[in-house]
Each structure stands twice: as structure tokens, then as C-alpha cells.
Image (tube, rainbow, N blue to C red):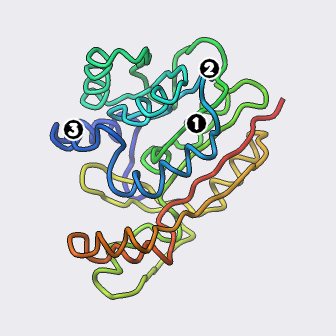
């Protein structure tokens, strides 16, 4: 990474996210979450009624709310003031019995009994010390609990942008880490091997790896207002992994 990032400096960027953006994502996130990430995460998790689930890096809380609607007992952890504030206000309105905790995912407080599952959706690529965050996620699980995480696919991180510009995907570097400025904050590139090797080093057994493709019909319908989105039909924008904790 080109900048001497700290957890605090990375977290602070997210306080610039506009309120209207959080409102637009309230129900189930954005287009990509709705059509690619969420369906795969929820399928990997399986039935949720009565299960204790940690939403690690819950942002404005849309995933926590989705999990609660499906019967899970949810705890959401989020460090950024703006996102945490929105999540807690929505909980006060909806009363879904979601417990939100404001904390850095690399140094979470005690969260009570171990969790049946931990979901970390589109979070790890935004954390400088991602290994500490992943370690905290796995440590929060009961033996045999399920860890499910989603990240931008490390081999196709700028898929939509380069497809719009060139009509094909182009990649100039992959193996070394680097910063990737985004609309509201910075993501950090790591190769696939980094994520997989860390999961294994933490004693987890891989259950499934998914690289979801966008439905061609959905892509065709969206293309007029989202030029280049058809790239998601044949190339994976996201990597989603399910792993089971040891012990």
C-alpha cells in the first residue's frame, strides 16, 4: 500500500458517505449487492431462524436487517460514526432486536456468546490490517461455526470501469498490494492467495468458493442506464467464500 494507513484513517473516510446514499441502500444494498453478493451469501448461510449471527463491518446495517428478517439473532459491528448512527436509528424505528456495537473490527470488544455464523460482506478489502479483522471474525465463532466473507474479486477489481472504457477487461498488476481510491473511501488490493492462505492459517476448512455471474436478462435490462454492466455476465466482480471454523 502506498500510504501509511491506520485503522482510524481508513475508518474516518466512511464518515463522508451522504445520507441519501445510505437511504438508497437501506433495503438490500446497491445493484451489485442485490443481484450478485446477497443471494450467494444468504444461500451459503442456509436457514437462519434461531441462529446467532455477527455482521462484521455492518455499515449502515442493510445486511443486519436482512438477516434479522430471516429469523437470525443479529449483532452488527461498525466503527464509522455516520454508518453506525444510521444503523442504530433504523433499529430504533424498526425494532428488529439487532444489537449494534460501535467498534474497530480489528479490536472488537467482547460480544457475548460465540456465534453460529459470521458474515463479513465487502469489508476486508477496506481494512488496512485485514488479517487482524479476519482473525477476530474467526475467533468470534463457535467450533464448527461458519465464516462467510465477500470481497471485490482481486483479479477483476476494476472490471466495470475498464469494460466501459475499452470494451474488455485490462489488468496491469496483480501480485503486489496497492491502494485503490473509491468514491467514498480507499480499498486495498491483495491477491487471492492472501485471503485463502489466511483462512487456512486460522484453522478453517473451506466449504465453498463462489464467483457469481450476473443474470444476462438483468444485465440487458440494466445496460441502458448502467453502460458496461454486461461485463458482469462473463467475468466475476466478486469473490465469496464460506469456511468452517475448526475445533
* Residue 73 coordinates in the image, percent (x, y): 54, 19
Residue at 70%, 46% in the rendered image: 199
Which of these two is toward me, 226 or 218?
A: 218
Residue at the location (42% across, 23% down)?
Answer: 103
Q: Is residue 48 above or below residue 50?
A: below
The numbered disc on residue 23 is 3
Residue 247 occupies quadrant: top right
Mark 2 vs mark 1: give the one in front.
2
Which residue was labeled with disc 2?
A: 50
Q: Is residue 146 above or below residue 122?
A: above
Q: Which residue is mark 1?
A: 132
Is disc 2 surrounded by few (<14), some (14 to 19) or many (20+) residues within 10 Å? few
13 is higher (above) or lower (below) than 69: below
Query: Is label 3 in a helix, a strand or a loop?
Result: helix
- Disc 2 versus disc 3: distance between alpha carbons? 28 Å
Helix, strand or loop for disc 2: loop
Q: Nearer the viewer, residue 145 or 73?
A: 73
Q: Quadrant of residue 209?
A: bottom right
Instruction: Give whichever of discs 3 and 1 has the lower sequence position.
Output: 3
Under tag 1, what secondary structure? helix
**Dot 2 or dot 1, earlier in sequence:** 2
Image location of residue 198, percent across then percent down: 68, 48
Residue 127 shown left or right of residue 90 in the figure: right
Between the C-alphas of marks 2 and 1, the distance is 28 Å
Question: Quick one: which residue is furthest to the bottom in this view?
Answer: 167
> How far apart, in angstroms, are the residues tagged by discs 3 and 1?
30 Å
Q: Upstream in the sequence, badge 2 or badge 3?
A: 3
Q: Position of residue 22 (x, y in %)?
A: 24, 39
Name the residue nearer the viewer: 240 or 134. Answer: 240
Amino acid at each position: 500500500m502506498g500510504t501509511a494507513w491506520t485503522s482510524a484513517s481508513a475508518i474516518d473516510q466512511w464518515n463522508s458517505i451522504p445520507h441519501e446514499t445510505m437511504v438508497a441502500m437501506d433495503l438490500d444494498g446497491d445493484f451489485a449487492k442485490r443481484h450478485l453478493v446477497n443471494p450467494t451469501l444468504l444461500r451459503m448461510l442456509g436457514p437462519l431462524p434461531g441462529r446467532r449471527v455477527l455482521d462484521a463491518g455492518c455499515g449502515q446495517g442493510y445486511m443486519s436487517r436482512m438477516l434479522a428478517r430471516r429469523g437470525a439473532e443479529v449483532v452488527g459491528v461498525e466503527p464509522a460514526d455516520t454508518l453506525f448512527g444510521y444503523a442504530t436509528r433504523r433499529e430504533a424505528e424498526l425494532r428488529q432486536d439487532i444489537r449494534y456495537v460501535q467498534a474497530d473490527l480489528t479490536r472488537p470488544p467482547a460480544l457475548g456468546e460465540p456465534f453460529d455464523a459470521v458474515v463479513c460482506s465487502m469489508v476486508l478489502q477496506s481494512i488496512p490490517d485485514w488479517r487482524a479483522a479476519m482473525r477476530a471474525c474467526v475467533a468470534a465463532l463457535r467450533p464448527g461455526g461458519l465464516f462467510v466473507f465477500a470481497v471485490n474479486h482481486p483479479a477483476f477489481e476494476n472490471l466495470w470501469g475498464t469494460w466501459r472504457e475499452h470494451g474488455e477487461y485490462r489488468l496491469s498488476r496483480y501480485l503486489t498490494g496497492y491502494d485503490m481510491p473509491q468514491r467514498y473511501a480507499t480499498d486495498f488490493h491483495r491477491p487471492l492467495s492472501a485471503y485463502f492462505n489466511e483462512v487456512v492459517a486460522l484453522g478453517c476448512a473451506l466449504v465453498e468458493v463462489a464467483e457469481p455471474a450476473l443474470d444476462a436478462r438483468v444485465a440487458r435490462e440494466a445496460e441502458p442506464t448502467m453502460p458496461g454492466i454486461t461485463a458482469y455476465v462473463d467475468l466475476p466482480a466478486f469473490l465469496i467464500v464460506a469456511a468452517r471454523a475448526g475445533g
